[in-house]
Image (tube, helix red, strand yellow):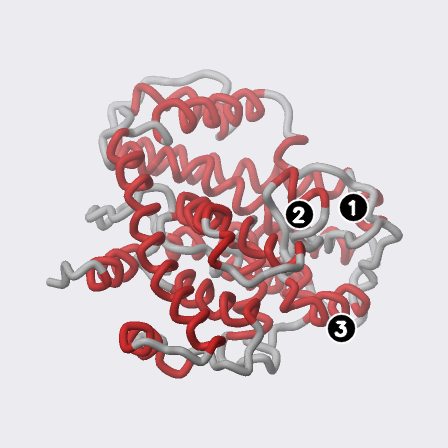
Amino acid sequence: MGRKTQVHPLSNHDHIHTRLTHSIEVGSVGRSLGHNVGVFLEKENELPSGISPQEIGAIVQAACLAHDIGNPPFGHAGEYAIRHWFKENGSKLALNVESERNDFEIFEGNAQGLRVVASIENNYQAGGLRLTYATLGTLIKYPWFSYHELAKSKGKFNFFQSEKNIAQELMQELGLESSSDHQYLRHPLSYLMEAADDICYKILDIEDALELNILRFDDVSTILNNLAGIEEEYSDESSDDFRVWRLRSTAINNLINKVTEIFKSNYCEIISGNFSGDLISRINGIEAIGIDKAKKVTRENIFLNRRKIELELGSYETLDRILTAFVEAANEVKKEKVSFKSQRVMDLMGANKFTKDMSYHECYLRITDMVSSMTDNHATHVANQLLGRAL
């Protein structure tokens, strides 16, 4: 994840967040949230015997560290590019079951993330990273499959068809089964993982924009003060860099405390599965004003930055080139008519290449596994190789 886009693709700036540095910071915030809630649960005699508040913090931290592990290169633009290719190239695919088509046409980094940690990393199809059920449950933000109506309307889900048995066993063991058709309840700690992510990107996206001179400190000082819970700005002769550092640390600590109180206030709803929405949206007061302003400046200034737009559009061409070559190779393998080109394409996959005995769905998953694991730079390099523009 060290060279994967968080917000700004292919940035050469060492201080700009990648998926790795973002995940480390989310893990730190998540650990604090988990510990705070663990202390609350201990006081309420709600912690299982032998479990400490520190262990609750560790569970949330582990889930936070893994929350972006399935994201493809180029950030969310990469997700959209993969979806676009599979929708536009349906005639090239041998997928007749809607649920299998949806796994690719609504390709989701969250579902890929669960697949990585629970199925394919370290112990292939034998438990993956072999994380605890509690950690896996905390990681799951959208507990439904790609054929669920919520997946179609939100473009979000956590379970590919390949992880159906894992999902069923996991949710049953955690007591998160629901009467709702093909939907499960969320693990209570998943709300903390989500809040940690929300806290970080709302503040750190602004910090990156300042580093890249997309924004100036005067553009965001009021926002940072709002998020820090500071009612009135005061004169400060420090450098802008120091003021940003001071405000961002104060803001993060303030939002951690706010989210902790919201979790405690809504604990009965959360633990019973009746809580809806997210914790951050329940924040009110001056911090809520700051959150709204942060969303606005992110939407209008950061996401519309010209270089960002150009690179995201380029990601469509990059992933189109890769997916076309590898899907053609998979189809030829299944038909047992493999051209020299497709054989060489398969050789790039190493030990993870597909075989004729695999289903088409599994072959295509092998391809999205490979693509999702690529960094921005590696995806660009492979696309250039396939186009005959190797350096």
Q: Quick one: label 1, few (<14), some, or many (20+) residues within 10 Å? A: some
Position of residue 274 in the picture relative to residue 299 (left or right): right
Report how far apart the C-alphas of labels 1 and 3 lie in the structure: 23 Å
Residue 2, given in percent of the width and then of the height, sits at 33, 59
Give 327 or 163, whichever is nearer the viewer. Answer: 327
Residue drawn 79% across the image and 54% down it: 182
Q: Amino acid at mark 3?
A: Gly
Badge 1 vs badge 2, beta-carbon distance below 8 Å? yes
Figure quadrant of residue 128:
bottom right
Q: Secondary structure at mark 1?
A: helix
Query: What mark, if any, has residue 191 been given in the picture?
Result: 2
Q: Earlier in the sequence, mark 1 or mark 2?
A: 2
Tell me the residue at 40%/33% (across/down): 247
Camera sees residue 253: yes
Is residue 178 found left or right of 263 in the rendered image?
A: right
Residue 117, located in which quarter of the rendered image?
A: bottom right
Front position in the image: 319 or 69: 319
Badge 3 or badge 2: first in the primary sequence? 3
Answer left or right for 95 relative to 341: right
Residue that mark 3 sits on: 50
Badge 3 element: loop
Amino acid at pointer 1: Ile
Secondary structure beneath label 2: helix
Q: Mark yes or no: residue 36 visible.
A: no
Give me the disc on residue 270: 1
Q: Are marks 1 and 3 in contact (CB under 8 Å)?
A: no
Q: Is residue 123 left or right of residue 82?
A: right
Residue type indicated by callout 2 = Tyr
Q: Earlier in the sequence, mark 1 or mark 3?
A: 3
Mark 3 Cα shell of 10 Å, populated few (<14), some (14-19), many (≥20): few
At 80% across and 71% down in the image, what residue appears? Answer: 49
